[in-house]
Image: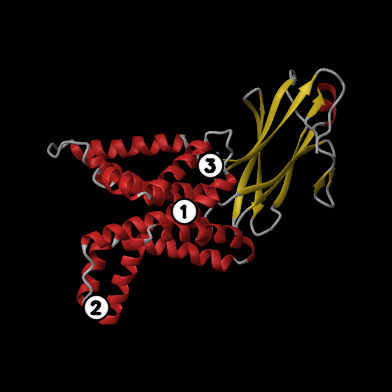
Amino acid sequence: MIKLKSFVVGLIELLKRYPGLMAIFGFASGVASYFLVEGRAAFAQLFAVLMLIGWIWLILENWLRAGIARRFGIDIPPGGMRYATQMVQQESLFFALPFFLVVTSWDHGQAVFTGLLVICALISVIDPIYYRLLAPRRSLFVIFHAFALFAVLLVVLPLILQLTTAQSLQLALVVALLFSLPSLGRLLPTDGWWRLPLLILLLIALAAGLWQARSWVPPAALRLTDMTLSQQLDREQRKPEASLVQIDAATLKRDGLYAWSAVSAPRGLREKISHVWMHEGVVVDSITLDIKGGRKSGYRAWTHKLSFPADVVGRWQVRVTTESGQLIGLTRFTVVEARAHTRGT
């Protein structure tokens, strides 16, 4: 027991001396998990399980401290636990970061979410900011803590439980809000029968507001590996012909247009995605497809749109979205009056 105690104390002191180690390890494990999702799914799942174990430790923090002290005679001081909390947050934020950086559409509201994730990750490794500005403000700290948990759950739930993106988002949101309850409770007076109903209503309102902003949350487990618009499609090879970025109105209405996409997802994951056709920012049509994970180049699927409104001239988008409305990726094309179209690469 003395050797074990010395090892634990020594490890904590080492990490205190080199606080960036956990951040480096977290980012490296996140990158490794991202690339291992397809080829070595078991290793990616192992990393994900380790992330959840860290959070279970924090949830059961007080009980585990007492149990370790009683069983092994190792009394972990509160300062040590605070540092353990910081390490888990660092590991979680930097673990999740590579997944979100790769799938974020930077000309979309998703940039706000991923930018906030980057800021939180940096705060977790800058001790003067973390301990002097964040940790003493309990309400703000709980929100920070919940956000780190929310981000890591969005990554690990599809890997471990093979939940769809929509299911993962819903579960992660519920768990994160439950962690925020102590912070919300401190905003209300301590007396009055109406305190609990008001807290519940506040929680519901917050959940509804966050759900409305779900399109700003990148789908961490999904990645658009290719997106092509074409007039012809080789159905045997499941590949489109030459891509285009511009087409004339008469040709579009006569022949229609294929939207071909390849979406990469973890092995065993089944998702519903949609090709959302938009004209001048207005949704014209939405076509749902089923995809399966586990293909290195992405699951290939397409839609063939033949029905168009009377006025088709202008700017168009085809967005690939999840069942919950999260953007996976998009492509653009323009419809012109003249009978000519420009082929892209």
* Residue closest to the eye, 338 or 197: 338
- Circle on res. 162: none
Going by the numbered disc 2, the residue's amino acid type is Phe
In the displayed image of the protein, which residue is found farthest to the left?
191
| Dot 3 and dot 1 residues touching (CB under 8 Å) | no
Q: Which residue is mark 2?
A: 72
Q: Earlier in the sequence, mark 3 or mark 1?
A: 1
Please, what secondary structure does the residue beneath circle 2 have? Answer: helix
Question: Which residue type does callout 1 highlight?
Answer: Phe
Q: Label 3 to label 1, Cα distance in Å?
A: 25 Å
Q: Quadrant of the C terminus?
A: top right
Marks 2 and 1, how far apart at CA = 32 Å
Q: In the image, what residue occupies the spot 80% across and 50% down?
A: 238
Q: Which residue is mark 1?
A: 94
Residue appearing at x 59%, y 39% in the figure: 105
Query: Where 280 sits versus 52, above or below?
Result: above
Compare marks 2 and 1 and give the one earlier in the sequence.
2
Is residue 173 shown to the viewer in this render?
A: no
Query: For residue 250, what is the image quadrant?
Result: top right
Disc 2, disc 1: CB below 8 Å?
no
Left or right: where 238 falls relative to 151:
right
Depth check: 30 or 223 in front?
A: 30
The quarter of the picture where residue 143 lies is top left
**Mark 1 Cα-neighbour bin, 10 Å: few <14, some 14–19, many ≥20:** many
- The residue at which mark 3 appears reads as 324
At mark 3, the secondary structure is loop
Element under disc 1: helix
